[in-house]
Image (cartoon, grey):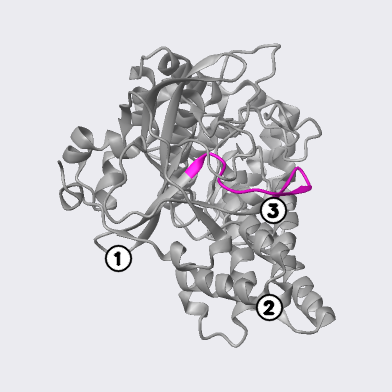
Amino acid sequence: MITNNELGWNFDNSYTRLPNEFFTKTNPIPVSDPKLVILNDSLAQLLGLDVTELMNHGVEIFAGNRIPDGAEPLAQSYAGHQFGHFTMLGDGRAVLLGEQITPDKARFDIQLKGAGRTPYSRGGDGRAAIGPMLREYIISEAMHSLRIPTTRSLAVVTTGEPIYRETELPGAILTRIASSHIRVGTFQFITGLGKIAELKTFADYTIDRHYPNLRDADHPYLALLREVIKRQASLIAKWQLVGFIHGVMNTDNMTISGETIDYGPCAFMDTYDPETVFSSIDTGGRYAYKNQPYIGGWNLARFAESLLPLLNENEEKALQLAQDEMTKYIGIYREYWHDGMREKLGLFDQEEADQDLIEELLELMKRNQLDFTNTFVALTFDTLENIKGCRTDDFKKWYDKWKERQNRQTRSTEEIHELMRASNPAIIPRNHRVEEALDAATEGDYSVMERLLEVLKNPFEHTPEQEAYANPPEPTNTPYQTFCGT
């Protein structure tokens, strides 16, 4: 039997030392014939794990058939507003093995997603299909390469067992890595219990784990709200800057750490259109691209509500403190977004008219149905002649205005180009390429996915090998739709 130390597992289980209401200890349900589909070598090394031994002996752990030494598996309890409706929830198909302490003393949750029923499954089977698990692997790793805070994916295994949705599908389990799985919905759950002492305990735990610099603040819980607002504003700005659409921004899918979590009906925008919605269940466009910043604020308001008992004993004063912080959110978001857009346009400094310049470009992109990613790449390399919609007189007028704006800077042409090159990815995980990889994987061919993952590793390199993956899909009358990975 391979030992724990040989694999490199080094578990601590701080979550189990919290009050029992916050979780239920439960083991993953074993599967019949697990096989390793993919292992994230570089992430395994970062975690302090032995890649060779994991390749040879890790599949039983990734499948939930064997609990590694030191792990204390549990399912977390939480709540959430799902499309605006409040529900008591919990890990219905995920089991947290424990917290891996890396060689440099960082702490990461190790979670098995699709590991079978838990006390929070609410009638579900607790399983997952291979397509959604590989989608999360591909998109989360692409997001990491795009320098966007995210949970990550360590491995995917097939279970050897079918699951049944509309059709019979191969079952799979994803090993997800996160700074933590503490969500806005976790705080909502605790507040819903009406236990102020437990809420304080959990807020202190969150501060210790994610914001230790706030321990000695004059008002640590108000400071916690302030920092979470900043991180979420920054995160959503980064989403908008690459055309990422999360698809299901429920409060249980919003982390306190500021990492992107839950890659269900997510997708990337090709043609620029602020109204873009991909999720099949978002019929009202609640989580459309243009709405993501405002839904982020709505979710943060729910977080602020959950903290009210800790902000002040006087309910009216607590509410005023929370409102004062929340009024700052949209301004913080806009500052992050405008800074990012300036970088995409090669602007090192600020001018009052920059906002108009940015908005004018986006309006031209929408009117001319331009590809979001490729337009910024064309601006970076001055190859607009290759994009049909950029040949209009209006676009040429904007281009001249933009060049004049660049020339008012004291930076060299080379410096401007390098800023744009580092701010505008050559490639994103195009939806048709992701679907192509998932279709092949469902049939047992993982080579398409492996090639896609390789080319997505360095999106800012702008290499010739990336060009084929930079092309948008062929025009179609059938709108692209995504589905929750249930």
- Residue bounds of the magenta highlight: 80-94
| Kind of residue at badge 1 | Lys
Q: Residues within 10 Å of mark 2 (few under 14, many from 20)?
A: some
State the quadrant of the C terminus. Answer: top right
The residue at which mark 2 appears reads as 310
Q: Residue at x 63, y 77 (%)?
A: 197
Give how far apart the Cα atoms at labels 1 and 2 are. Answer: 30 Å
Give the foreground label among 3 and 2.
2
Residue 164: which numbered mark, if any?
A: none
As displayed, is residue 184 above or below residue 286? below
Q: Nearer the viewer, mark 1 or mark 2?
A: 2
Q: Name the disc covering residue 105, or none.
A: 1
Callout 3: 10 Å neighbours few (<14), some, many (20+)? Answer: many
Point out residue 215 in the picture as x, y percentages from the top left corner. 51, 81
* Of callouts 1 and 3, the N-terminal one: 1
Of labels 1 and 2, earlier in sequence is: 1
Q: Residues within 10 Å of mark 1 (few under 14, many from 20)?
A: few
- SS category of the residue bearing label 3: helix
Residue underneath mark 3: 296
Q: Is residue 279 above or below residue 189?
A: above
